[in-house]
Image: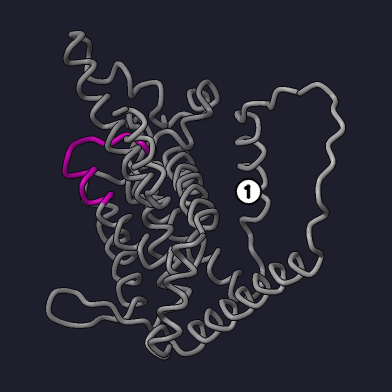
Amino acid sequence: MAQGNLKYQFSRLNIAEKLIAANVLVFIVNALFPFLLNLSKNSIVQWFELPKDFFDFLMQPWSIITYSFFHGGFGHLFWNMLLIYFVGRIFLNLFDAKRFLNVYLLGVILGGFFFLVGYNIFPAFFGVNAYLIGASAGASAILIFICTYMPNQEVRLIFFNVKLWYIGAFMVLMDLIRLPYSGNAGGHLAHLGGALLGYWYARQLLNGMDIGAGFSRFLDGIANLFKKSEKKAPLKTVYRKQKSTASKTTVNYDKQSQQKKIDAILDKISKSGYESLSKAEKDFLFQAGKEK
Protein backbone atom coordinates (compact mmCIF):
# COMPACT_ATOMS: atom_id res chain seq x y z
CA MET A 1 0.00 0.00 0.00
CA ALA A 2 2.77 2.43 1.03
CA GLN A 3 4.83 1.50 -2.02
CA GLY A 4 1.89 2.15 -4.31
CA ASN A 5 1.27 5.51 -2.64
CA LEU A 6 4.94 6.53 -3.06
CA LYS A 7 4.81 5.54 -6.71
CA TYR A 8 1.66 7.60 -7.19
CA GLN A 9 3.16 10.63 -5.44
CA PHE A 10 6.32 10.36 -7.55
CA SER A 11 4.30 10.16 -10.77
CA ARG A 12 2.62 13.46 -9.88
CA LEU A 13 5.94 15.33 -9.72
CA ASN A 14 7.12 17.33 -12.72
CA ILE A 15 10.42 16.42 -14.38
CA ALA A 16 12.44 18.97 -12.37
CA GLU A 17 11.02 17.63 -9.10
CA LYS A 18 11.72 14.05 -10.19
CA LEU A 19 15.35 14.99 -10.87
CA ILE A 20 15.58 16.56 -7.43
CA ALA A 21 14.10 13.44 -5.82
CA ALA A 22 16.58 11.21 -7.68
CA ASN A 23 19.53 13.38 -6.59
CA VAL A 24 18.40 13.38 -2.95
CA LEU A 25 17.95 9.59 -3.00
CA VAL A 26 21.42 9.06 -4.49
CA PHE A 27 22.91 11.41 -1.88
CA ILE A 28 21.33 9.44 0.97
CA VAL A 29 22.37 6.05 -0.44
CA ASN A 30 25.92 7.24 -1.15
CA ALA A 31 26.29 8.49 2.42
CA LEU A 32 24.40 5.77 4.29
CA PHE A 33 25.56 2.49 2.76
CA PRO A 34 29.34 3.03 3.07
CA PHE A 35 28.81 4.15 6.68
CA LEU A 36 26.64 1.15 7.66
CA LEU A 37 28.90 -1.36 5.88
CA ASN A 38 32.09 0.29 7.16
CA LEU A 39 33.37 0.96 3.65
CA SER A 40 35.40 3.87 2.35
CA LYS A 41 33.37 7.01 1.58
CA ASN A 42 34.08 6.78 -2.15
CA SER A 43 33.24 3.07 -2.48
CA ILE A 44 30.07 3.88 -4.48
CA VAL A 45 30.84 7.23 -6.09
CA GLN A 46 34.13 6.02 -7.61
CA TRP A 47 32.12 4.02 -10.17
CA PHE A 48 30.04 7.02 -11.25
CA GLU A 49 32.25 10.12 -10.91
CA LEU A 50 33.83 11.62 -14.02
CA PRO A 51 37.63 11.16 -13.96
CA LYS A 52 39.90 13.73 -15.56
CA ASP A 53 41.94 11.14 -17.49
CA PHE A 54 40.54 10.20 -20.93
CA PHE A 55 41.59 6.56 -20.60
CA ASP A 56 39.91 6.27 -17.20
CA PHE A 57 36.81 7.84 -18.75
CA LEU A 58 36.79 5.26 -21.54
CA MET A 59 36.63 2.54 -18.87
CA GLN A 60 33.43 4.06 -17.46
CA PRO A 61 31.81 6.14 -20.24
CA TRP A 62 28.48 6.26 -18.39
CA SER A 63 30.12 8.69 -15.98
CA ILE A 64 29.60 11.55 -18.48
CA ILE A 65 26.02 11.60 -17.16
CA THR A 66 26.09 9.75 -13.83
CA TYR A 67 28.55 12.20 -12.25
CA SER A 68 25.71 14.73 -12.10
CA PHE A 69 23.73 12.65 -9.57
CA PHE A 70 26.45 12.72 -6.89
CA HIS A 71 27.38 15.61 -4.60
CA GLY A 72 30.25 16.36 -2.26
CA GLY A 73 28.15 17.52 0.67
CA PHE A 74 24.74 18.76 1.77
CA GLY A 75 25.46 22.38 0.79
CA HIS A 76 26.56 21.29 -2.69
CA LEU A 77 23.33 19.32 -3.09
CA PHE A 78 21.07 21.97 -1.56
CA TRP A 79 22.08 24.90 -3.79
CA ASN A 80 22.00 22.85 -6.98
CA MET A 81 18.55 21.47 -6.20
CA LEU A 82 17.25 24.91 -5.22
CA LEU A 83 18.37 26.32 -8.58
CA ILE A 84 16.83 23.41 -10.51
CA TYR A 85 13.54 23.83 -8.62
CA PHE A 86 13.08 27.56 -9.21
CA VAL A 87 14.38 27.66 -12.79
CA GLY A 88 12.39 24.49 -13.53
CA ARG A 89 9.15 26.26 -12.57
CA ILE A 90 9.78 28.97 -15.17
CA PHE A 91 11.02 26.50 -17.80
CA LEU A 92 8.07 24.12 -17.49
CA ASN A 93 5.56 26.96 -17.84
CA LEU A 94 6.95 27.45 -21.34
CA PHE A 95 8.10 24.03 -22.53
CA ASP A 96 7.41 20.35 -21.95
CA ALA A 97 9.36 17.81 -19.88
CA LYS A 98 11.23 16.42 -22.89
CA ARG A 99 12.79 19.77 -23.75
CA PHE A 100 13.71 20.35 -20.11
CA LEU A 101 15.44 16.98 -20.01
CA ASN A 102 17.17 17.68 -23.34
CA VAL A 103 18.66 20.96 -22.13
CA TYR A 104 19.57 19.56 -18.72
CA LEU A 105 21.27 16.37 -19.88
CA LEU A 106 23.02 17.98 -22.85
CA GLY A 107 24.30 20.60 -20.41
CA VAL A 108 25.59 17.83 -18.15
CA ILE A 109 27.35 16.17 -21.09
CA LEU A 110 28.95 19.35 -22.47
CA GLY A 111 29.93 20.42 -18.96
CA GLY A 112 31.64 17.04 -18.49
CA PHE A 113 33.54 17.43 -21.75
CA PHE A 114 34.66 20.94 -20.77
CA PHE A 115 36.09 19.39 -17.60
CA LEU A 116 37.82 16.57 -19.49
CA VAL A 117 39.28 18.81 -22.18
CA GLY A 118 40.30 21.54 -19.75
CA TYR A 119 42.20 19.17 -17.48
CA ASN A 120 44.03 17.58 -20.42
CA ILE A 121 45.10 20.60 -22.48
CA PHE A 122 45.87 23.35 -19.94
CA PRO A 123 49.23 22.99 -18.15
CA ALA A 124 47.75 24.47 -14.96
CA PHE A 125 45.92 21.18 -14.40
CA PHE A 126 48.69 18.73 -15.34
CA GLY A 127 49.52 16.41 -12.47
CA VAL A 128 46.35 17.33 -10.59
CA ASN A 129 44.31 14.34 -9.46
CA ALA A 130 40.70 15.43 -9.94
CA TYR A 131 37.24 14.12 -10.65
CA LEU A 132 33.89 15.77 -11.30
CA ILE A 133 30.59 15.34 -9.45
CA GLY A 134 27.50 17.51 -9.09
CA ALA A 135 24.48 18.71 -11.07
CA SER A 136 25.83 22.24 -11.56
CA ALA A 137 26.42 21.91 -15.32
CA GLY A 138 22.82 20.82 -15.93
CA ALA A 139 21.49 23.52 -13.60
CA SER A 140 23.59 26.14 -15.41
CA ALA A 141 22.26 24.93 -18.77
CA ILE A 142 18.59 25.39 -17.87
CA LEU A 143 19.28 28.74 -16.18
CA ILE A 144 21.19 30.23 -19.12
CA PHE A 145 18.64 28.75 -21.56
CA ILE A 146 15.84 30.69 -19.85
CA CYS A 147 17.99 33.83 -19.49
CA THR A 148 18.70 33.70 -23.24
CA TYR A 149 15.20 32.75 -24.39
CA MET A 150 13.46 35.62 -22.58
CA PRO A 151 16.28 37.95 -21.45
CA ASN A 152 14.06 40.92 -20.56
CA GLN A 153 11.76 38.96 -18.25
CA GLU A 154 12.08 40.28 -14.70
CA VAL A 155 12.17 38.10 -11.59
CA ARG A 156 12.01 39.10 -7.94
CA LEU A 157 15.27 38.84 -6.00
CA ILE A 158 14.48 39.58 -2.33
CA PHE A 159 13.77 43.35 -2.49
CA PHE A 160 13.96 44.24 -6.17
CA ASN A 161 13.29 42.99 -9.69
CA VAL A 162 16.13 41.92 -11.98
CA LYS A 163 16.09 41.05 -15.67
CA LEU A 164 17.01 37.44 -16.39
CA TRP A 165 19.91 38.30 -18.66
CA TYR A 166 21.56 40.20 -15.79
CA ILE A 167 21.42 37.05 -13.68
CA GLY A 168 22.80 34.87 -16.47
CA ALA A 169 25.64 37.29 -17.23
CA PHE A 170 26.51 37.55 -13.53
CA MET A 171 26.65 33.76 -13.09
CA VAL A 172 28.94 33.28 -16.11
CA LEU A 173 31.17 36.17 -15.05
CA MET A 174 31.51 34.75 -11.53
CA ASP A 175 32.57 31.36 -12.93
CA LEU A 176 35.23 33.05 -15.07
CA ILE A 177 36.52 35.14 -12.16
CA ARG A 178 36.57 32.26 -9.67
CA LEU A 179 38.16 29.76 -12.07
CA PRO A 180 41.77 30.45 -10.96
CA TYR A 181 41.07 31.09 -7.27
CA SER A 182 38.29 28.92 -5.86
CA GLY A 183 40.03 25.53 -5.74
CA ASN A 184 37.13 24.13 -7.76
CA ALA A 185 38.38 24.85 -11.28
CA GLY A 186 36.85 21.65 -12.65
CA GLY A 187 33.43 22.62 -11.36
CA HIS A 188 33.63 26.08 -12.92
CA LEU A 189 34.72 24.60 -16.25
CA ALA A 190 31.65 22.34 -16.13
CA HIS A 191 29.41 25.34 -15.29
CA LEU A 192 30.73 27.18 -18.34
CA GLY A 193 30.12 24.14 -20.55
CA GLY A 194 26.54 23.87 -19.33
CA ALA A 195 26.03 27.62 -19.77
CA LEU A 196 27.31 27.48 -23.35
CA LEU A 197 24.89 24.65 -24.15
CA GLY A 198 21.95 26.55 -22.64
CA TYR A 199 22.81 29.70 -24.58
CA TRP A 200 23.34 27.86 -27.88
CA TYR A 201 20.16 25.78 -27.50
CA ALA A 202 18.00 28.84 -26.79
CA ARG A 203 19.48 30.90 -29.64
CA GLN A 204 18.91 28.08 -32.12
CA LEU A 205 15.37 27.53 -30.85
CA LEU A 206 14.57 31.22 -31.34
CA ASN A 207 15.74 30.73 -34.94
CA GLY A 208 13.32 27.82 -35.35
CA MET A 209 15.78 24.93 -34.86
CA ASP A 210 15.62 22.40 -32.02
CA ILE A 211 19.18 21.10 -31.66
CA GLY A 212 18.02 18.55 -29.09
CA ALA A 213 15.54 16.74 -31.36
CA GLY A 214 17.98 13.95 -32.23
CA PHE A 215 19.01 13.53 -28.59
CA SER A 216 15.33 13.33 -27.63
CA ARG A 217 14.78 10.49 -30.13
CA PHE A 218 17.84 8.74 -28.69
CA LEU A 219 16.39 8.96 -25.16
CA ASP A 220 13.03 7.67 -26.43
CA GLY A 221 14.83 4.70 -28.02
CA ILE A 222 16.54 3.86 -24.72
CA ALA A 223 13.25 4.20 -22.82
CA ASN A 224 11.54 1.83 -25.25
CA LEU A 225 14.15 -0.85 -24.52
CA PHE A 226 13.01 -0.97 -20.91
CA LYS A 227 9.31 -1.09 -21.61
CA LYS A 228 7.75 -4.43 -20.90
CA SER A 229 6.74 -6.14 -24.10
CA GLU A 230 3.07 -6.86 -24.19
CA LYS A 231 2.11 -10.51 -24.10
CA LYS A 232 0.59 -11.62 -27.34
CA ALA A 233 -2.98 -12.78 -26.91
CA PRO A 234 -4.50 -15.58 -29.02
CA LEU A 235 -5.91 -14.34 -32.31
CA LYS A 236 -9.53 -13.44 -32.00
CA THR A 237 -11.99 -11.64 -34.21
CA VAL A 238 -13.52 -8.66 -32.44
CA TYR A 239 -16.31 -6.53 -33.85
CA ARG A 240 -16.33 -2.94 -32.63
CA LYS A 241 -18.41 0.05 -33.43
CA GLN A 242 -16.55 2.38 -35.73
CA LYS A 243 -15.52 5.58 -33.96
CA SER A 244 -16.96 8.74 -35.32
CA THR A 245 -14.64 10.40 -37.82
CA ALA A 246 -16.13 13.74 -36.87
CA SER A 247 -15.13 13.17 -33.22
CA LYS A 248 -11.53 12.41 -34.19
CA THR A 249 -11.39 15.45 -36.40
CA THR A 250 -12.68 17.65 -33.57
CA VAL A 251 -10.05 16.34 -31.14
CA ASN A 252 -7.23 16.84 -33.66
CA TYR A 253 -8.49 20.34 -34.44
CA ASP A 254 -8.59 21.25 -30.75
CA LYS A 255 -5.00 20.07 -30.25
CA GLN A 256 -3.77 21.96 -33.28
CA SER A 257 -5.63 25.09 -32.19
CA GLN A 258 -4.14 24.89 -28.69
CA GLN A 259 -0.60 24.40 -30.05
CA LYS A 260 -0.99 27.38 -32.40
CA LYS A 261 -2.07 29.53 -29.46
CA ILE A 262 0.92 28.33 -27.38
CA ASP A 263 3.32 29.08 -30.24
CA ALA A 264 1.86 32.57 -30.63
CA ILE A 265 2.29 33.27 -26.90
CA LEU A 266 5.88 31.98 -26.89
CA ASP A 267 6.65 34.16 -29.89
CA LYS A 268 5.22 37.16 -28.03
CA ILE A 269 7.42 36.35 -25.00
CA SER A 270 10.57 36.10 -27.14
CA LYS A 271 9.84 39.52 -28.66
CA SER A 272 8.40 41.51 -25.75
CA GLY A 273 9.06 39.52 -22.58
CA TYR A 274 6.82 37.55 -20.24
CA GLU A 275 5.32 40.67 -18.65
CA SER A 276 3.79 41.66 -21.99
CA LEU A 277 1.29 38.79 -21.67
CA SER A 278 -2.23 39.40 -20.48
CA LYS A 279 -3.52 37.57 -17.41
CA ALA A 280 -5.59 35.29 -19.65
CA GLU A 281 -2.51 34.40 -21.72
CA LYS A 282 -0.46 33.69 -18.58
CA ASP A 283 -3.24 31.49 -17.18
CA PHE A 284 -3.57 29.64 -20.49
CA LEU A 285 0.20 29.03 -20.70
CA PHE A 286 0.35 27.82 -17.09
CA GLN A 287 -2.54 25.40 -17.64
CA ALA A 288 -1.01 24.10 -20.86
CA GLY A 289 2.28 23.52 -19.04
CA LYS A 290 0.51 21.43 -16.39
CA GLU A 291 -1.12 19.24 -19.04
CA LYS A 292 2.20 18.33 -20.70
**Residue 225 placement: quadrant:** top right
Circle 1: element type:
helix
Residue drawn at the location 41% of the way across and 90% of the way down? 278
Front residue (pair 109, 82): 82
Q: Residues within 10 Å of mark 1 (few under 14, many from 20)?
A: some
Residue drawn at the location 38% of the way across and 40% of the way down? 8
Give the percent coordinates (x, y) of residue 150: 44, 78
Residue drawn at the location 17% of the way across and 39% of the way down? 74
Give the percent coordinates (x, y) of residue 26: 31, 31
Outermost left residue: 159
Residue 217 in sight from this viewpoint: yes
Q: Which residue is mark 1?
A: 215
Up-down relation of residue 121 to residue 38 (above or below): below
Give the percent coordinates (x, y) of residue 34: 22, 15
Question: Magenta segment, which residues?
Answer: 68-81
Up-down relation of residue 34 to residue 85 (above or below): above
Front residue (pair 185, 222): 222
| Residue 203 within the magenta-colored segment of the rendering | no
Question: Is 47 left or right of 207, judged from the image as shown?
Answer: left
Give the dominant element type of the magenta stretch: helix, strand or loop: helix
Front residue (pair 138, 221): 221
